Amino acid sequence: MQTVLNLLEAEPIRLFLSFGVILFLVLNLAGILTFAERKVAAYIQLRYGPNRVGPRGFLQPAADVVKLFTKENVSPQRSDLWIFLGAPIAMFLPAAAVWLVVPFAPRSVVADLNVGIVFFIALTSIGALGLIMAGYGSRSTFSLLGAMRGAAQMISYEVPLILSLLGVIMLAGSLSFQDVVNAQAGGFWNWYFLPQLPMFITFYIAGVAEARRVPFDLPEGESEIVGGFMVEYSGMTWGLIQASEFASMALVSAITATLFLGGWQPPFPFLDLGNFNWLWFAIKTALIIFTFQWIRWSLPRLRMDQLMDFGWKVLVPVCLIWLFVTAGAMLAFPSVF
Amino acid sequence: MKGMGITLKHLFDKKVTRQYPEYKKETFERSRGLLTVDMDRCIACLQCMRICPDHCISIEQEKRDADGSGKAKPYAVGFVIDDSRCMYCSLCVEVCPVNCIYHTEEFEAQAYNRLELARQFGERPVDPTIDPKPAVKKKPKAAKQAPKKEAAA
Amino acid sequence: MLGEERKTEETTLSQPVSGRLANPDIRDEFGLETIDMNMGPQHPAMHGLLRLILELDGETVVRCDPVMGYLHRSKEKISENRMYPAVIPITDRIDYMNNMAMEYGYCLAVEKLLDVEIPPRADAIRALMNEFSRIMSHIPSLGFLLLELGAFTPILYAFRERERIQSIMEEVTGARMMFHYIRLGGVKADLPEGMPEKMWEYIEGLENRLQPDFIDLIEGNEIFIARTRGVGKMSPEKAVEMGLTGVPLRCTGVEFDVRKHYPYGWYKNLDFDVVTDDAGDVEASYRCRIGEVRQSIRMIKQILENLPGGEVMGDTGRRIRPAEGDGIARVESARGEYAVHVVSDGSDTPYRVHYRTPCTVNMQLLQEIVPGHYLPDIMPIMGLIDPVSGAWDK
Amino acid sequence: MAVTLPEGNLETRLSRYLDGFNNSHGIEDSLVEGDLVQVVVGPEDLPAVLTTARETLGILHLSFITVVDRQGSFELTYELLDLRGAQVRVKTTIEGDEPVIGSVTGIYPTANWHEREAYDMFGVAFRGHPDLRRLYMWQDHFDHHPLLKSFEISTRRTFEGLR
């Protein structure tokens, strides 16, 4: 028994195994989140939501997946087939791979990279590639418009996203997620969302934009461009795009929870659950996901020019100013930090 | 951003949807459901067939001494209401002199085939695909007589 | 038949499509190519079946050409082949969001040719149901506007109200949408027992819910204001020139309401204001609609307070054969001036019925004001006009 | 408000409208009834009459154009509103099977789609219309004008094959 465990903990096997576990979790997460999304939407809109499949509708995601698998995968006749089919994979893999560096609990992280934050930034940037592939490959004006919007939006919002991380990196003095979480130990007043409040809000907003959620869902914009880049997808390719959307939403929530809300740290020291500290992480992530959904079902969508204005003229200056404030404070009171 | 609070409040409100197959909506006295015919009372006056805007009623008429009075009266041997065309306007109900056609509370009309939606009431089925006589455009007598008078004058 | 004219049509069509309505100022600033795009007829946010042929320069619309007719059912030809009373359920299907006004217009037009006196109670009930129908149409249209902007929730709140009014309507008329309640000479039946109290109760509840669910949720939202202020802006001269009526005209500041300026039926006895706004953009149209819902509530209260007694059906005789001539009547539907022109030849069926639906006329605005706007602005502008597929296609 | 709408007493306005038409054009027939002024003009005068109505008399709103097929002639009704309680109805009759009449889109831009509809449904051709295409019916392979009395419709149930 012990030898098997030791074997499992040996490096290459552990990595592959845990990556398998992560992939499994992410795929399931997409299903659970669709269900949660529909329930939250229904309750806000005075409806019941899915409640026919299984007890209270809990098996609805499974039914959806079965339906998606049995549907025919239609591709437009004049599409660029390889790019068209490669796009969902190019969107899903980066979103799933970032989960490798997210610390769930003190010891449970797949790869404790010392440049975890850089890894996260690098992989989220790749998401825009999948978007452009989808828009270009499906050869439709709606898709092309959606892809152009998506590329412009994701690249613009990358800037405030990265800038807002710098404050946390400066405070923690490390690029590793694990170190950032450890630096926030000892109660919620030590979490970074208090000293870094503007950065936290900026990161949250930029994260919503990165996850392409309302009010920044312009690449989809179903009332203008009918689903944008994914208008031509059907069956499981569509399901994969949808899964990657939910995975990246959950990812942004998890990163927000890790960097600004103390990750798996309990809000009060006496609430330390030991090995079960991952519960705190889960609760925080779920709360942030809920705010995403709440915003989605309350607000209308911005327009492209307003989106760009907001990104470049509001978020970036706020980040830069607060960066200088943080740096100045660290220089002035080195004893505090 | 006021709206966010409102949506949050509605999250905990009572839900307003009705679970359809278990809970059917209440019908009122005046609700117009599927049509039905009391064939015992029908006098085959064809008024409903004439007024119907959709031509969904077809009646096959025959002279028959049904009530034993010794006089042959019009009798509806075939009566079909095609629900795939009916628009529940209730004109036939209002026009019927003997109140033999009326709305029921049923409102679920569904079938796999359009022909199944044509409900037969008479003793002999009527082919619903054959068109009933369309509403004939009749000039009033005065209009017809007017040119004659002019000619006479 | 029309050899020469047909040739003109063909030459018009054979010209490059981009040359006809484009605004040359916007295009080719940098010598860029434009994209031709078809929006609709199957488009999730399009009101019904409308096809817009768009020419886009990036996200900017250079040309917009609406193509209608995907829901054309030739109501006018059908009406020519039905007896006078049997046309009423067909008029119901013209504007399926505001059916009562459609019936009312047709009945008024035929009654001009008929020698019949409408009892006052019938008149009052007609106006009452008409105002309910207007609320039933205005509130979902607010929801549609938000739906087009990307917020999904307000439409469901709007439909909750619509469903409740529909239940009231079903109890009174017998149907939830296609009422067929107003008849030649009166209304089909009197209000059922206890109905005025029920209506009163509902109206008071609606007044309370209007503030949080439709004003705070929509107007208290910065993104809504950013998306609608200044979008679809037009001057009052332009609006009058384009023949607009209803909310699109009133939101530019021109005070015109058929109920006020060409009063018909019970509206002569009612006290109400014509809601206008000066801005002439989508936000102004939203405020006008909210104002009109409030005015409708006010009118319903007035009618319910002084509901006259008596008969509800005038004597039209068994067969309805109007005198020869033209009967023209206009009513204010939720979308604007709805006029019906009935030409009778003295027989059982109309010789010609012409419906002037407000949507058809208001939709001309699309090709005038959409060029120069961004692609996502088309949808709020559609919300300003608030057309209904059945009404523009007849 | 930049739009000037007529003011004053309804009766004086109606008589002003009638005088305005009578002074500048040959009117075949006229009628004042209630809030309505009805004038009948020849088809060749029609654009001029409507120009008078808009430019001189200040009637700003064209409500609709109705065409009635009288089997051999076409009767056109132009309904104008001054938006303050008065209706002006201009009627004209075009003889023959191929009706052609001057377009009023230059006077009332809103007539654009009204005239397209009339062309679509009756084949009335409007001289000088900028964009005379069909409004409702499909543009090609359809050579009929459905509201003509000669266009027979069948009430036969045509979907036997679908049943």
Image (tube, coloured by chain):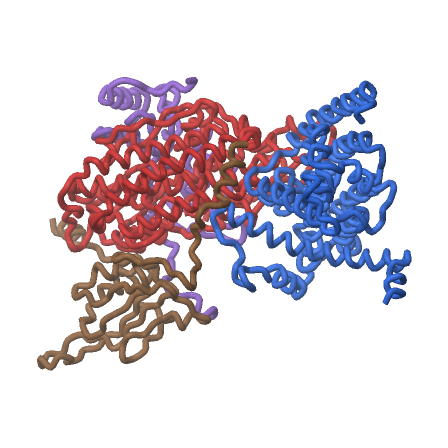
Chain colours: A blue, B brown, C red, D purple
* Quarter of the rendering containing residue A76: bottom right
Residue pictured at 42% horizontal, 52% vertical: C73
Where in the figure is residue C4, as x and y percent of width and height?
50, 43
Is A113 placed left or right of C120 in the picture?
right
Query: What is the residue that sits farthest to the front in this orientation?
Result: A270
Asked whether C315 or C182 is in front, the reply is C182
Where in the figure is residue C128, as x and y percent of width and height?
27, 40
Residue C161, visible in the rendered structure? yes
Where in the figure is residue D96, as x and y percent of width and height?
37, 44
Q: Is residue C151 above or below residue B15?
A: above
Asked whether B63 or A91 is in front, the reply is A91
Residue D104, visible in the rendered structure? no
What is the count of numbered marks? 0
Q: Is residue B146 above or below residue A54?
A: above
Asked whether D83 or B9 is in front, the reply is B9
Is B67 placed left or right of C124 in the picture?
left
Where is the N terminus of chain A found, in terms of image quarters? bottom right
Residue pictured at 19% horizontal, 46% vertical: C185
Query: What is the residue that sits farthest to the left in this orientation?
Result: B69
Where is the C terminus of chain A found, in terms of image quarters? top right
* Quarter of the rendering containing residue C52: top right
Residue pictured at 16% horizontal, 55% vertical: C318
Asked whether A265 or D2 is in front, the reply is A265
Where in the figure is residue B95, as x and y percent of width and height?
21, 60
* Quarter of the rendering containing residue C139: top left
